[in-house]
Amino acid sequence: MSRSKYIKWGLWLITFLLIAVMTVIFSLAKGEIDIPLSKIYNILINRNNDLEYTVLKEIRLPRIILGLSVGGALSLAGVILQGIYRNPLVEPYTLGISGGAALGVAFAIVAGLNFSVGSFMLPVSGFIGALITVFLVYILSVRKGKIHTQNMLLIGVMVSFIASSAIMFIMATTTNENLHNIVFWVMGSLDETNKDLIKVAVIVSILCLLISYIFIDPLNALRLGEDKARHLGINTDLSIKLLFIISSLLTGMCVSIAGVIGFVGLIIPQFMRLIVGSDFRILLISSFLTGGGFIVFCDTIARTIVAPNELPVGVITGIIGGISFIAILINLGKNTRHI
Amino acid sequence: MEAFFVIDNISCGYGNKFKISEISISVQQGNFLGIIGPNGSGKTTLFRAITGDLKFESGSIKLNGKNLKKFSYKERAQNIAIVTQDIESPDITVEDYVLMGRLPFHKGYQFFESKEDVRIAEKYMKMTAVNKMKNKYLSQLSGGERQMVAITRALVQEPKLLLLDEPTSHLDIALQIQILNLVQQLNAELGLTVLMIIHDLNLAGEYCDELIMMSNGKIKDKGSPEKVLTYSNIEDVYGTVVFTQPNPLSGRPAIFLVSKRILNSINNTK
């Protein structure tokens, strides 16, 4: 009886993969110099060290890989957090996790940890910042051993404000050189030249995707609410804590490498839920793939729309994400199907 | 011998105040037990203590002689199925929701539903006639349909004990009877032990084998419907005058309301 459902899922998966691949090809072709689609394959195969090969291999491909990882990771974090809270307005940013991660990274830049210890200190301090924030928000919103969702959201928004104010403070008191680094990174950009950091992004995002699939039962049961999930034999408290850690890891990694890119974690899961339904077995992977494609698409626009100048990708995701979000909200009111 | 399900001297509440105190109930296997009482008498608090949603300091609850606190989450859900009053209406189909009743039985990591799970789900969907709406979303169902679907999900857990929190509230009279007929049938045919909170005294008297009447967080009376549903008990607990008489068809106690006008005219004739 369920077979037709799985066939449908398979078709969705293939569709999302194809869209992602097409976006990647489009992104390879577009830029300061346009490379015809028909030539891309030959250039990458022949490996002539000409300008076009260098542009594709050294500039666009790493950026696309980073975009796929960061977009996938942010969407994954968003879909997990929305699953825990059963609230479509939740994402790493609204819970203050992005803010906490950003504050951690800002500290690391000012302290010069990325030079004195190594560039890997940026994602590490981002993760620590995210985890401390989650922990703090969690402690503040737990009463009698139970998480109060509404409290947590409000506290999350406040923590976010505090963190961004603290970053402003750091920016106002720091040297010019650090200021440039922080500003550039706060705006959200995929322009990362450090190949090791890109590798970290790929590994963390794929690993977290695999780990999140261990939590399919808790995530699916939590759709009914915490109490009912527990009535179905789910250890909700433990599952939620572990899912928070996964979300922090994803967010800390993204923020430290690509800065604060808003709306992806909110808009992509929302869209996917409307298209594939609320079952996390298909929702997790769909959000991951589409989120990756979405960021790559936005980044391509950011690179080309005011060429030769570049826009931060966060500006594009903010505009596209915000408009789509309003459209979805209006539609949700008309539709009986909701979360 | 100790009864199948024993609530032994539990007290609990919210904050420092006890909402219910020193409650002891024992239920024999296969019994259909109803908990009645006015609003605020502690019925729901007791229910939440039994379901594990509310922690209690003193006393214990045992199923088959084993303390519920010693059960793992999964074991608990394998033995006790719970149907609460508020049934969420998210974007899930009836079939998927009913299949969630098999979650406590997932062994290790299970990505696809097993054939066994699907067979059990279909069996009970057929029994409760829920199968004809299995492709609908929960949000598209009426209140009565949602209640039927929730009970079906509970059955799919193949529990030893079924807990129901006011399964007939907000339903019209036909649906109330349809739901309780189903519960009665499950109780009789599957030998399922049922513990149900119910507001309507007539329904409680008609369907339950045994009643617990609560008042101000304590048990006022317990026993057969005939013993518990007396006009004096009801007057004490609800503070209202009623008239009771056995239902001519079933012999179970039936409660008649007495309006103020009638009451006055009776008093006047005296």
Image (cartoon, coloured by chain):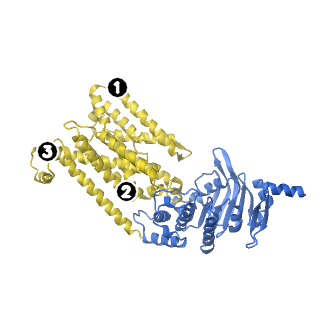
Chain colours: A yellow, B blue
Which residue corresponds to mark 3? A54
Picture disc at residue A196 = none
Which type of secondary structure does the marked residue at label 3 adopt?
helix
Helix or strand or loop: what does disc 1 sit on?
helix
Picture layout, residue A33 above or below residue B209: above
Residue sitting nearer the eye, B34 or B136: B136
Residue B238 is drawn in which quadrant?
bottom right
Residue at 54% in and 67% down: B152
> Please, what is the three-letter code of the amino acid marked with disc 3?
Thr
Work out whether mark 2 precedes mark 3 in sequence or the reverse, and give the earlier one: 3
Residue carrying label 2: A275
Q: In the displayed structure, does residue A241 sit left or right of residue B221?
A: left
Where residue A241 appears, as percent x and y from the top left, is 45, 49
Residue type highlighted by circle 1: Ala
Q: In which chain is the residue bearing label 1?
A: A
User: Is the residue under label 3 in contact with that under label 2 (CB below 8 Å)?
Assistant: no
Q: Which residue bears the numbered disc 1?
A: A172
Separation of residues labelled 1 and 3 (CA atoms): 39 Å
Judge whether B231 appears above or below A262 on screen. below
How far across and how far down the image is residue B247, in percent? Answer: 75, 70
Label 2 marks which chain's residue?
A
